[in-house]
Image (cartoon, rainbow, N blue to C red):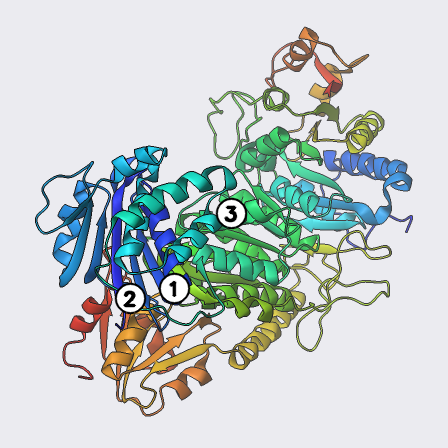
Amino acid sequence: MKNLETSAIKTWCPGCGNFGIINALKQAILETEEKIGRENFVLVTGIGCHGKVADYLNINSFYALHGRGVAVATGIKIANPKLKVIVCVGDGDAYDEGAEHLVHAAKRDTPITVLVHNNRVFALTTGQTTATSPVGFKGKSTPEGSEERPINPLKLMWATGAGFIGRGYAGKPDHLAFLIRKAILHSGFAVVDILQPCVAFFNTYEFYNQKTYILPRIPKDKEILEKIEEWNYEDGEGKIPLGIFWKR
Amino acid sequence: MGKISILIGGEAGQGSRKAGLLLGKILLNWGWQVFIYDDYQSLIRGGHNFSLIKASPKNPLAADLSLDLLLALDKKTVELHREKLKEKGVLVYNTSKISDVRQGLGLPLERWVREAGGILLMENVALIGAAAKILGISWETVEKVIKEEFGKEIEEKNLKVANLAFSSCKTLLKIPKLNLHRQILLNGNEAISLGLIKAGLETYFAYPMTPTSGILHFLAEKQKEASLKVFQLESEIGVVNAALGASFAGSRVAVGTSGGGFALMTEGLSFAAQAEIPLLIVEGQRTAPATGVPTYTAQSDLFFTLHAGHGDFLRFLIAPGDGQEAAFWAGEALNLAWEYQTPVILLVDKQICESTFTVEGGIFSRIKPRKPLLASTSSDYLRYKNTPSGISPLAFPGEKGKVVKVNGYEHDEKGLTVEEAELVQKMQEKRLKKFQKMREAVEKLPAVNIGGKKNSQIALIVWGSVKGTALEVAERRGLRLVQPVILQPFPEKQMKKALEGVKKVIVTENNALGQLGEILPRYGIKVDSKILKYDGRPFWTKELDEKLGNIGN
């Protein structure tokens, strides 16, 4: 049972940010499974490149519809509170089509762990803009560049009362594993926005490598929103903080 | 006296619906069987609401518009319904709201309420006290029902109000006391809820929508007593997906909605078919398309529920025809969902959900949860094991040594995504085997009801709530009534048998396109004519009788 791999062959592009995320997730599961029990983990995924983790991890899984992972997870947790439900969703899943479920799960404080593989692009559908694509993003549906401002998902989650808000980066898998472990062990609703470069349609490795830094500690009071707003998912200047921004 | 029709009406907020239910219970306790149609508008105050009660020694399932007794809390009730009174019918009105009504019996309801120390809303109870006396029902019967219906703190005042009205009136339309049976009054939503509970319901999700909100309210009220988890979620999309999750986790779950909400659920419906997840959806139809006429009835979602969801799959589509059938089939529907790991739709309508029926108390002891096919304890669990029946043994997350993987993509037996032609075909064929088992299951269930004169060469085919009116008319005219209850998989053999010797088929539906009539020819059933109604109201018995002209007479 130690082996978390299935027989499925990984079809992500070489260099895909998802490799960093799945490794961090595996590490976090192995570090917490003694406490939780391997059989009590349930992985819910949406649709998109990220969703393939359901095929790649040898744990209970529910490969849900696009946008609906959080709603499915809510039902699982209500039905059997003993289960540890981890939801891997994309930015399209979480912030576009499924935004209502995320907002209400945060409001309800449903004890699930939401990991958003946020590559800021629809990749599996070959490159269109999402809720977190920056202004000027040139995708196949916005050849002249998107005119819409991105949503800052951390700010959205802060506004809806989420009890645990974190941001990680696929290029820093150890820190990401730490964040995921903390989110899994949090007793209520937890969300981690994970910056994930997409080598095919929005390669942000260099950008994130230059700009991200790890918060020295969890911010307090007025600092929380300041840190959340330090980067607004645009291309501009400024640093990108990673870590736990708020924990109830 | 064969049967009696009573209409109680008033403005929203005057409590005419409660009054109707009280009088219905009083009649039931007087040994009569009761049906109540409630007519109300999409508003909270003002407007016009009424309850139409039919009581008879033999279970009535539909209402009549020829009244023996008209009870008016307000002026509009007199204006709108006076002409429905029979020649010897009695009109009773509230003198605090109306004056000088020709040939009516004016009652000072407000004065009685004040004298008894009650609040103005209790005018409805005063009216019921008066009505009981007018019908010659004993005070003990009225007292028993009021005690059952009101909490201790307001019971005493209500009794005082009712008694003052009762003792101030005379008996004008005496109805005899009949033998009591073990029966209860339930509206369709309550009957469905109790049927679900008896079949082992554990979780219920919904987003409020008329006419099935009553299920949400009833189950929420009962959640402690019946150990249920009842949640109102953010949308019908959230509801159906949460239900899929709960079902995957092993919880017997149901959801309720109307056509519009069901539209939002259809992607989830398709998911349930592909991932083979038990899913029960109660769809209470109302007048549509779109927002339609929200608090009125229709049967116009038959095409929709038969075909909803993308992809090749069957679902059980079950349309009970009255309160008692709704209770039984709600339980059966939950069991079928789990036995066949499939979506099931219980298709009802406003006429069933919100009308009140006399239901045999014994029905609920006959509804029991049946155990689904469960995986043995061995390891190497395959969620989609390709068995001869196409039904794979179930296991749930949390079981040591088993990894349970469900998947909305095409998948292999383990639940891992596949795209290879051979595997895609094989897994579709696995599900086709299961659909064949579902077809066989339907023919073993009482999927078609036959009523009226069973050897008549003229058949009236109906589905769902039209059964109520049609049964009465078929019995009176000597027609054969044929009511398919399961509409998918279609009970072809049972229908063929039910229609043996029939020369003429008339289909009667509460919709504008005659949807069942369009479907029957697929199964070789020729439809000679259609009688349709699509004004948001159910067929009234006299109306259907007239529309049939000289057929059968």
**Tags 3 and 1 both on a single chain:** yes
Q: Residue at x 56, y 80 (%)?
A: B440
Relative height, residue B436 to residue A150 (above, below): below
- Lower position in the chain sequence, tag 2 or tag 3: 2
How far, Cα to Cα, is label 1 from label 2? 9 Å
How far, Cα to Cα, is label 3 from label 1? 31 Å
Looking at the rendered structure, the secondary structure element under dot 2 is: loop
Relative height, residue B462 to residue B228 (above, below): below
* Image-based side of B7 in relation to A246, left or right: left
Relative height, residue B223 to residue B343 (above, below): above
Mark 3 closeness class: few <14, some 14–19, many ≥20 residues within 10 Å: many
* Residue B385: percent from left, percent from top: 73, 68
* Residue B342: percent from left, percent from top: 59, 64
Return the residue nearer the eye: B96 or A4: B96
* Residue A143: percent from left, percent from top: 48, 29
Q: Report the amino acid beneath label 2.
A: Ile
- Lower position in the chain sequence, tag 1 or tag 2: 1
Return the residue nearer the eye: A225 or B553: B553
The chain that hosts pointer 3 is B
Of the 4 image quadrants, the one containing the C terminus of chain B is bottom left
* Residue A230: percent from left, percent from top: 65, 11
Query: Which quadrant holds residue B28?
Result: bottom left
* Image-based side of B498 in relation to B371, left or right: left
Residue B295 visible to the viewer: no
Write down the residue under mark 1. B30
Write down the residue under mark 2. B175
C-beta proximity under 8 Å, tags 1 and 2: yes
Write down the residue under mark 3. B216
Mark 2 closeness class: few <14, some 14–19, many ≥20 residues within 10 Å: some
Callout count: 3
